């Protein structure tokens, strides 16, 4: 398992702690990222748009604040997920005291598959 801390990831705040479950090669080019991500209070993954892939966030613990394509704000609790398709954007942040822990899965569109 590859563990990486990314500061101000995608223009976000603080540190995003990634525990990569599998590499893109191990997923045979079907997916780009499969990782457990931890955000402490006040930390975030900044707003970004997906092109050629989509991303699913599945909350394991804590409460996520999600910017859905600058159209609405969603609050996700454990057991809930949200998928952002290609051509749309999102960000995720932790505004609570408890750590936010979620799975991130980035899936290539069929035309982008390696």
Image (cartoon, rainbow, N blue to C red):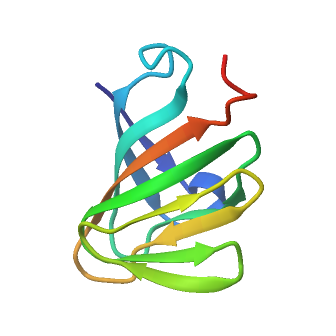
What quarter of the picture does the N terminus occupy? top left
| Image quadrant assignment for residue 98 | bottom left
Q: Which residue lies at the image location 25% right of the left edge and 81% below the top edge?
A: 97
The answer to whether 109 is drawn above or below residue 46 in the figure is: above
| Image quadrant assignment for residue 59 | bottom left
Q: Is residue 98 left or right of 48 when viewed as pictured?
A: left
The answer to whether 57 is drawn above or below residue 6 in the figure is: below
**Identity of the residue furthest to the front in this view:** 110
Q: Nearer the viewer, residue 33 or 81?
A: 81
State the image coordinates of residue 100 (x, y, percent, origin top left): 30, 67
Q: Which residue lies at the image location 66% right of the left edge and 60% below the top edge?
A: 11
Q: Nearer the viewer, residue 5 or 67?
A: 67
Q: Is residue 92 left or right of 59 when viewed as pictured?
A: right
State the image coordinates of residue 24 (x, y, percent, origin top left): 50, 22
What quarter of the picture does the C terminus occupy? top right
What number of labels is visible? 0
State the image coordinates of residue 8 (x, y, percent, origin top left): 57, 57
Q: Nearer the viewer, residue 35 or 17?
A: 35
Q: Which residue lies at the image location 42% right of the left edge and 82% below the top edge?
A: 75
State the image coordinates of residue 107 (x, y, percent, origin top left): 55, 38
Q: Is residue 85 left or right of 3 when viewed as pictured?
A: right
């Amino acid at each position: 398992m590859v563990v990486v801390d990314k500061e101000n990831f995608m223009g976000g705040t603080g540190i995003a702690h990634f525990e990569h479950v599998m590499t893109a090669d191990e997923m045979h080019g079907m997916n780009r990222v499969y990782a457990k991500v931890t955000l402490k209070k006040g930390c975030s993954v900044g707003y970004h748009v997906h092109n050629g892939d989509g991303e699913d966030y599945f909350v394991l613990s804590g409460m996520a604040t999600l910017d859905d394509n600058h159209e609405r704000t969603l609050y996700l609790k454990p057991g809930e997920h949200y998928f952002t398709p290609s051509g749309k954007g999102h960000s995720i942040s932790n505004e609570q005291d408890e750590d936010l822990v979620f799975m991130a899965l980035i899936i290539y569109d069929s035309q982008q598959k390696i």
